[in-house]
Structure formats: structure tokens, C-alpha cells
Image (spheres, grey):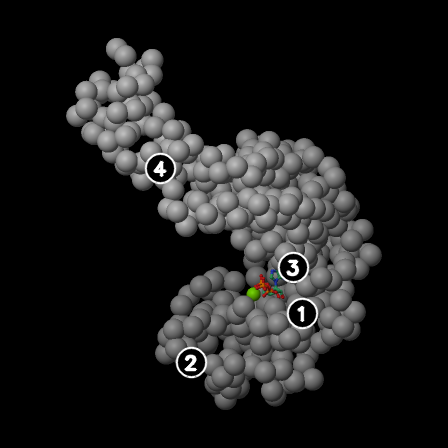
Amino acid sequence: MEIQVPAPVEQIIEQLNCCGYEACAVGGCVRDSLLGRTPGDWDITTSAHPNQVKALFRRTVDTGIAHGTVTVMVDKVGYEVTTYRIDGEYEDGRHPKEVEFTPDLLQDLKRRDFTINAMAYSRKTGMVDAFGGMEDLKAGVIRCVGNPIDRFTEDALRILRALRFSAQLGFEIEPETYEAIKIMAPNLKQISRERILVELTKLLLSEHPERIQMVYHTGMAPYISDTFGRVHLPLPVISPELPAKKHLRWAAFLQNEAEADAALILKQLKSDNDTINRTRILTRFAKASLPPEKAALRRVMSQMTPELYDDLLLLKESRQEELSQVRRLTEEIRRAGDCLSLKSLAVGGQDLMDAGIQPGKAVGEALNCLLELVFNHPEYNEKEILIQYALRKKPEALQQ
Ligand code: ATP
Ligand code: MG
């Protein structure tokens, strides 16, 4: 069995071989190549020690010297070259207390999480598959290398990785591995929220976002966070047709939660604020009805960016809402360039003050009234009309 290795990877392996070291492509890149998927990055495993790797290449970066990893730069692309290692005892289910280098490739493959991730390849060695990775790849199975209870005890992140790979590859989790996940779920408490977020986001962005259900079926949800454990079940349908954008997939998952709860779940997982805010807006409006009526649509459009509004329509359509009328009206609103925000209102605060409105709170209130007016009558968005309206109508707030 051969795979196509990019030229720089080939060069790095050959260079190491020339100096008497073993070297192979390993892990995800081998797995993805065998599946006909394009690998995200290429990792190399070698018998050479980090200082020996550094001595051989012109440009290197000490990415994780303590763990045996040196990044070799070729044409501005980095390739991680890691020394064969045996992970020592895990201190706290998170970090190996120490790593021990080994001259034996098989030892290095044995420490890897799943059989499909434990294959190595080079032109010289061919496929090195000591744990039945090929067979599992063909059968579409996620299976731990060795005893699953032991492997999840060493590192509980693997529990989530199993789900994530299952969703990305459309693979089933082998029964013994799945049982071990259920038993070991409480150990997720040891894993940092940031790392949990990374895995869950990859799962949601995959071709099988609905497999987030496994987080509940396996009983791991309460160990992710208390809020996560309280999500309404059954989960909503999460369509794999939705574009793979973080906020959109998270909102699809959390659409039945109150917006504050959705935001809290993401905040507790240390999500970035941008994703939290977008998800919050989508979960809020996903539940509200979107009437096929222009003024109402302008009001909704004014609450978010055009891109987010488009995402909202997709999310609603994935819930089988019929929006062809809404889409047509949206198109008309956009084509007409209707005013959708204070920024594009034909008057600003200064204009109103120049016209005699008291500076202060009244100005803001008047602007909001005018915006509301313009949502209903976009043709009124002209300076003279709006000023007259503001003066003539004299809402309560303007009368002091
Ligand atoms: P992708 O990069 O597509 O997410 P990957 O398989 O390359 O998938 P990485 O996290 O980049 O995953 O890790 C590279 C390899 O390192 C894996 O294929 C696996 O062999 C090993 N590995 C990564 N994390 C662990 C872990 N927690 N326990 C054991 N082995 C691991
Ligand atoms: Mg990788």
C-alpha cells in the first residue's frame, strides 16, 4: 500500500535516512491519505533526537523540544518532526509526567490513541500498521490502541477525540471502546475547557454534527459543564447541510436554549466573544417568527450583519421553515438600499441639535424613533423630512 507524500516531507525523511535515522510520516496524514482526504498537516516521526534533527536542517523551530518535537521549515511551511517516544505515566490524566525517547517505532505507535491514527508510512518502510489500523479504516471503526479503559485513564481528552473522529469520518465507535467511554466519562472533569471546546467545535463543524448527541448518550455532558448537562433533550435536528461556520453550527445545536443559556455554555468553555455574540443573536432570532413583511424584516436585519442575517435564514430553513417569501422581500430591501441602521439614517445627532432638540438623552431617543419610522417608511429617509418629523411629532422625550 502506497500513499502520495508531498515533496518536502519526502525530502525531510530522506535527509534523516541519509544520516542513519529512521523516519516516517505518521498519524492523521497517513489516515487521511488512505481515506482519499487531504491531510491538514504532515507529521513526521523519527528515531533521531531533537538536537540531531535540529543539526540537520537549516530552519527549525523549537515547538515542543521537551516532548521531542521540532518544526522543520521548508518553503515557509512547517513540518513537525517528533522523536519516537513512549509517554511516561500521566500525572493527572492530562500531561505525561515525562516523555521517554525510544529507538523503536512500534513503541511510538503504541502510545497513539486510535488504531487508525497509529500507522506510519515512508517509501522505504512502506505502511507500518501494527495494530490493525487498515482494517479499522476499511470497516469505518474508531478503536483504541490497547485497552480502552487504560488509554482513557491516561488521557481523558481521547474520549472526546473518539467522538470527534467519529463525526469527521462518519465512523462507528467500536463497542468495547464505546463502553469504556461511558465508564470513563467523569474523567473529562480533568480536561481544560479550552481543549473541550476545540474538540466539540471540530465535531460540530464536521459532516456529522448530529453526532454531538453522543455527548448525551455516553453520559459525558454533565462533566463538560453543568450548563451543558442541562441542555434540553431531545436535541434539535442539526443539518449537515448548514455551512461549516462555528457560530452557525453552535447555534443549530443550542437553538432550543434560551439565548442567555446558549451564551453561558460557550462562555464557560472559554469561547471567543465573537462566536458567543453571533450564537446568541442566532439563538434569539431562531425562535422568533420572521413574518413576510418588509418593516418587520428591516427591524430584524438592523440587529445583525448581513452575513449573520443570511445565516439566520439558513438556520430557519434547516428547521423546515418556508422562507421563499421572506427571501424575496429581503432581496428587495437590499436592492433598494433601505436604511437599516442609525448609521445610514439621513440625519445624525448633530442635525437634530442644530434643529433645536435638547442635547442629551432626547437626541438618542429621537434618532431611534426616526429609525423606527424609516423601517415602516423607507422613503422618509431624507434629512428635511426626518427633521420636520422629529420637531413636529415632538415625542414626550423631546419636550423638556
Ligand atoms: P487532525 O489534525 O486532522 O485533527 P490528527 O490525527 O492529525 O487529526 P492531531 O491532534 O494532529 O490529530 O495528532 C496527531 C497524531 O498524534 C494523531 O494522529 C495521534 O496519532 C497522536 N495523538 C494526538 N493526540 C493524542 C492523544 N491525546 N493521545 C494519543 N495520541 C494522540
Ligand atoms: Mg494533525
Q: Secondary structure at mark 3?
A: loop
The percent position of residue 256, horizontal first and vertical second, equals 65, 36
Numbered circle sitting on residue 118 = 1
**Ligand 2 quadrant?**
bottom right
Position of 372 relative to 310 (above/below)? above
**Residue 21 or residue 265, whichever sits in front:** 265
Q: Amino acid at mark 3?
A: Glu
Asked if disc 1 is less than 8 Å from ligand 1, the answer is yes
Q: Quadrant of residue 388?
A: top left
Q: Amino acid at mark 4?
A: Glu
The percent position of residue 318, horizontal first and vertical second, equals 64, 48
Which residue is denoted by mark 3 in the rendering?
207
Res. 158 in view:
no
Q: Secondary structure at mark 4?
A: helix
Q: Amino acid at mark 2?
A: Leu
Eye-nearest disc, 2 or 4: 4
